[in-house]
């Protein structure tokens, strides 16, 4: 059962409404998190709450309650749902505070939403990517609900017969439309450093730790589009995509068009980690 918690109460899905002048709706002035639930247990919930708090701080976005309170309610919502395989979506916006003006309200009434729903699909065996110019803002480390260019990257990739868009900015590969990107070259794992150009992915962080535990060298440094075309392996990471091999970029296969051995080891290790 889908469970909705909105501004302090649990409400039936059909009755969950926000005012038309909610600043999330008008200005995309809001932040969010998606948490994956495995066997009834949320994975890395605390990491997600810390990132939500950090996004709020970076956007000077107040909470009506607090991340700790939302965490408690998320667990309550999950319990009410009775779901074992699910996602928990949490969104906070600057809310409704009267007619539309650019000034932030002096007395904000943030909107807080938690949505728990069933998630029964599995990540794809592998995906292909299409490069797209990264025209997003310079604050990609904020998990903002302003995702137009992310959705456009996905659609552009689909139009070109690929599964997802891979952002390229000034020749440097940053991340995919809703996941982080890794490539393997001569046994070393590479990924874009954590800065304002990418989302500090929680899966990314866990995968880096797993690689280090497995003795795989990791370098968090920028690399170019051309370099990726010559990589031995590549994959994306994300809360729902987990570790998904990327076997092609534009018209070229990566790693002979097959998932590579390091990718598969990390995919397996990540599966074991999340399944406890
Ligand atoms: C742009 C972007 N990068 C990376 C990620 C992966 O982050 P996480 O592993 O925390 O899900 C996401 C997830 O939604 C994303 O939207």
Image (cartoon, rainbow, N blue to C red):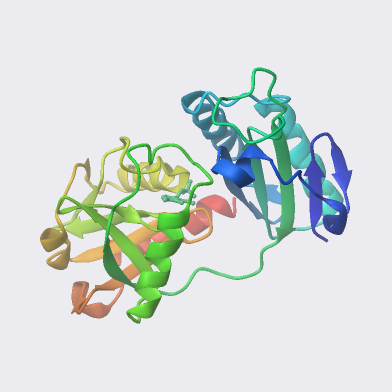
* Quadrant in the picture for residue 150: bottom left
Above or below, 221 against 125 in this view is above
Of residue 197 and residue 102, the one placed in the foreground of this image is 102
Q: Residue at x 48, y 61 (%)?
A: 241
Counting labels gives: 0
Point out the residue furthest to the top here: 106
95 left or right of 46 in image: right
Above or below, 47 against 89 in this view is above
Q: Residue at x 83, y 54 (%)?
A: 81
Above or below, 80 against 141 in this view is below
* Quadrant in the picture for residue 168: bottom left
138 left or right of 151 in image: left
128 left or right of 267 in image: left
Q: Residue at x 66, y 28 (%)?
A: 67
Q: Is residue 94 visible?
A: yes
Whole-percent x and y of residue 212? 31, 42
266 left or right of 193 in image: right
Whole-percent x and y of residue 217? 22, 45
Quadrant of the image containing the N terminus: bottom right
Of residue 138 and residue 163, the one placed in the foreground of this image is 138
Whole-percent x and y of residue 144? 50, 42
Q: Is residue 43 visible?
A: no
């Amino acid at each position: 059962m889908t469970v909705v918690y909105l501004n302090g109460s649990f409400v039936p899905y059909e009755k969950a409404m926000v005012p038309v002048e909610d600043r999330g709706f008008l200005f995309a002035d809001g932040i969010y998190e998606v948490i994956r639930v495995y066997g009834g247990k949320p994975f890395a919930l605390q990491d997600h709450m810390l990132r939500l708090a950090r996004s709020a701080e970076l956007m000077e976005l107040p909470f009506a309650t607090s991340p700790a309170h939302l965490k408690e309610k998320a667990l309550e919502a999950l319990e009410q749902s009775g779901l074992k395989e699910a996602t928990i979506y949490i969104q906070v916006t600057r809310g409704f505070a009267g007619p539309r003006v650019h000034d932030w309200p002096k007395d904000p009434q943030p909107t807080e939403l938690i949505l728990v729903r069933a998630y029964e699909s599995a990540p794809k065996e592998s995906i292909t990517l299409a490069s797209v110019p990264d025209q997003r803002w310079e604050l990609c480390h904020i998990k903002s609900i302003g995702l137009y260019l992310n959705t456009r990257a996905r659609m552009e990739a689909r139009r070109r017969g690929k599964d997802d868009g891979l952002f390229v900015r000034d020749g440097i590969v940053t991340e995919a439309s809703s996941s982080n990107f890794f490539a393997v070259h001569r046994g070393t794992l590479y990924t874009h450093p954590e800065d304002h150009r990418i989302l500090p992915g929680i899966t990314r962080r866990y995968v880096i730790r797993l690689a280090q535990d497995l003795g795989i060298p990791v370098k968090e440094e920028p690399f170019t589009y051309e370099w990726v075309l010559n990589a031995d392996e590549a994959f994306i990471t994300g809360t729902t995509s987990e570790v998904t091999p990327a076997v092609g970029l534009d018209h070229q296969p990566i790693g002979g068009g097959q998932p590579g051995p390091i990718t598969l080891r990390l995919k397996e290790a990540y599966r074991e980690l999340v399944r406890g």
